């Protein structure tokens, strides 16, 4: 143990049984009196991808800064040297790592979380940035793998979120380092890009590098990691890294809300995935039959085939970036006028846009209570929506001072408490951590089921899609040029069609029912592709 730790820690938020002594020893860093405390660190191993799974505000970035040598941990006392850190981790797998770090033998490379901030720090053309980063002579290979060829001559500040993400990942891959850290590599990417990036990061580890990654898309984390750590605790107050766990088991324990080795329950409920075929039995009334709709922007054209939406159902919208998903949703919301066809229904529609603005003067409570104050007092809404999303904690904050994730949660809440027949949610998981994604998924399902309302949700997170959807709508075409929206179909048919275009197959985990991507070329992958069953066989 570190022997320097002095303070006792607040554990009232969760039920922890085998504490506190064991944990006191693992006290790694405390930012100050009454400030955030970090317990334990993740392991770092050559040739392995170590995944980190847990809510925001529990010290993931802090741990990475320490492992990258950017932050000398105070060991919850007044430590001022790396020698003490090495001593504190004696007998631990990290001892050798810290020795190498101290001797300058470890060169860390970090792909930061907030890629949208990159244009503020870096100017110039993509080509020049990547050429400068290239220490291994792999410019062409990496540019092609990440499909960046056609943006090489663009300025950094002209890139979309998804393009910025891939440029940042490319810049990290081109460095010659030992330790690579990818902080949320899937943000802004569509499903095909997410799995492609996961594969590329895996290759990096296969070539002997040590890789650490934080990822909130559980299908991606699962595909990417050799082992994982679950981080639990109280966001903003303290965070504890679990023992390393096998990826499958670790994610399952996380979904159950209970860590076995640690004997810790950190969530009162389990997340279970039902086969959506089990849901479809309830025959329901038609909400609306919408006509063929076309939007022609000049450079881009979307054609949506006519379709039917039922009451009480959740329909997910899937497809690559730039294929017209947002355009379609905007037409249904009445925000964009179709070039052909007409949306002339009497339905009340509540719409959460993909890009949300914080241009509201006032507090979160003002904003929400003006939409429907009674919902804020309703026990059903408190239990299903407001408390799980942590909204009451935000009531007194100014809307224009919220962080990206806070704003997203408020925007989702604002959309869901509005009285409407049809709820349109465009990419609700953006900026949310894994715990919040699960909470939003449950809230969407429970509200639609209970109230018999209909939701259309644009989403790239496969576990969320699987959890919330009764049916699915697939968008196809050529991104940026033309898109075609197919009518909503059953999950199996829709996912088969969609995943065939992505070239990835999924199976179900027998314990939790969650979808897991098959490794390319594995027996299951080949069998399922032969049968044309890309989305599990049931
Ligand atoms: P995560 O990466 O899991 O979101 P972080 O490691 O970024 O978590 O932050 C954990 C907590 O530590 C947060 O509550 C954050 O506000 C706090 N924190 C981060 N940096 C500092 C700092 N320099 N001084 C004080 N508190 C900090
Ligand atoms: P998705 O939501 O599937 O990522 P979008 O509907 O946002 O796709 O965009 C589809 C295409 O339409 C993109 O190429 C985008 O640049 C283009 N587009 C979107 N809005 C406009 C607009 N107002 N004017 C011109 N082109 C647009
Ligand atoms: Mg969109």
Image (tube, grey):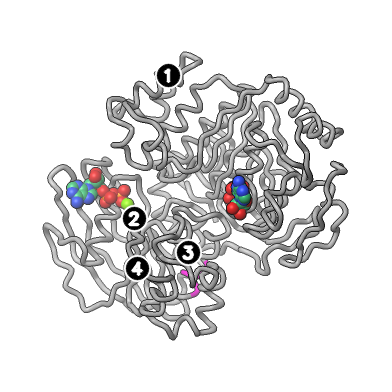
CB atoms at circles 4 and 2 under 8 Å apart? no
Q: Nearer the viewer, residue 403 or 408?
A: 403
Element class at badge 1: helix
Q: Is residue 349 left or right of residue 444?
A: left
User: Crowding at label 2, few (<14), some or many (≥20) Cα neighbours within 10 Å?
Assistant: few
Q: Residue at x 42, y 19 (%)?
A: 132
Q: What element does badge 3 sit on?
A: helix
**Circles 1 and 2: CB atoms closer than 8 Å:** no
Q: Residues within 10 Å of mark 4 (few under 14, many from 20)?
A: few
Q: Is residue 195 visible?
A: yes
Q: Which mark is residue 355?
A: 2
The residue to which callout 3 is attached is 468
**CA distance for labels 3 and 1:** 44 Å
Is residue 249 shown to the viewer in this render?
A: no
The structure residue drawn at horizontal position 16% and vertical position 73%, both measured from the top left corner, is 344
Which residue in the protein does label 4 denote? 361
């Amino acid at each position: 143990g570190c022997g320097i730790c002095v303070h006792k820690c607040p554990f009232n938020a969760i039920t922890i049984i085998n504490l506190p002594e064991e944990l006191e020893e693992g006290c790694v860093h405390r930012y100050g009196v009454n400030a955030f405390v970090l317990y334990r660190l993740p392991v770092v191993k050559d040739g392995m991808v170590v995944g980190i799974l847990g809510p925001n505000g529990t010290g993931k970035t802090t741990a990475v800064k320490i492992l990258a040598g950017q932050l000398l941990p105070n060991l919850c006392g007044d430590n001022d040297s790396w020698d003490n850190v090495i001593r504190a981790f004696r007998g631990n797998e990290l001892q050798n790592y810290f020795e190498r770090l101290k001797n300058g033998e470890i060169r860390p490379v970090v792909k930061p979380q907030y890629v949208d901030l990159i244009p503020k720090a870096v100017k110039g053309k993509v080509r020049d940035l990547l050429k400068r980063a290239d220490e291994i002579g792999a410019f062409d290979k990496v540019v092609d793998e990440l499909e960046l060829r056609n943006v090489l001559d663009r300025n950094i500040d002209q890139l979309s979120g998804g393009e910025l993400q891939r440029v940042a990942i490319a810049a990290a891959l081109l460095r010659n380092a030992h330790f690579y850290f990818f902080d949320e590599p899937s943000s802004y990417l569509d499903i095909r890009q997410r799995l492609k990036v996961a594969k590329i990061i895996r290759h990096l580890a296969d070539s002997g590098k040590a890789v650490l990654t934080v990822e909130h898309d559980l299908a991606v984390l699962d595909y990417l990691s050799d082992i994982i750590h679950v981080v639990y605790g109280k966001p903003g107050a303290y965070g504890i890294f679990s023992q390393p766990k096998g990826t499958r088991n670790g994610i399952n324990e996380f979904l159950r809300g209970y860590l076995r080795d640690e004997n810790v329950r950190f969530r009162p409920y389990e997340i279970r995935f039902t086969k959506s075929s089990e849901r479809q039995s309830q025959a329901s009334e038609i909400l609306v039959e919408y006509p063929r709709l076309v939007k022609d922007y000049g450079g881009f054209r979307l054609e949506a085939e006519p379709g039917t939406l039922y009451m009480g159902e959740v329909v997910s919208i899937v497809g690559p970036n730039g294929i017209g998903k947002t355009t379609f949703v905007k037409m249904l919301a009445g925000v964009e006028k179709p070039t052909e066809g007409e949306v002339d229904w009497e339905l009340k529609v509540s719409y959460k846009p993909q890009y949300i603005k914080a241009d509201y003067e006032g507090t979160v409570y003002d904003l929400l209570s003006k939409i429907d104050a009674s919902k804020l007092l309703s026990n059903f809404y408190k239990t299903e929506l407001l408390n799980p999303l942590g909204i009451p904690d935000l009531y007194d904050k100014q809307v224009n001072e919220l962080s990206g994730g806070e704003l997203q949660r408020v925007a989702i809440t604002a959309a869901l408490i509005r009285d409407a027949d049809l709820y349109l949610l465009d990419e609700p998981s953006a900026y949310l951590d894994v715990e919040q994604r699960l909470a939003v998924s449950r809230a969407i399902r429970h509200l639609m089921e209970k109230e018999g309302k209909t939701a259309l949700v644009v989403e790239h997170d496969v576990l969320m899609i699987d959890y919330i959807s009764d049916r699915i709508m697939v968008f196809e075409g050529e991104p940026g040029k033309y898109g075609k929206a197919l009518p909503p179909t059953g999950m199996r048919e829709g996912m088969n069609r969609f995943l065939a275009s992505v070239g990835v197959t999924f199976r179900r985990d027998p314990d939790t029912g969650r979808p897991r991507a098959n490794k390319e070329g594995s027996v299951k992958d080949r069998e399922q592709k032969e049968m044309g069953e890309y989305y599990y066989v049931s």
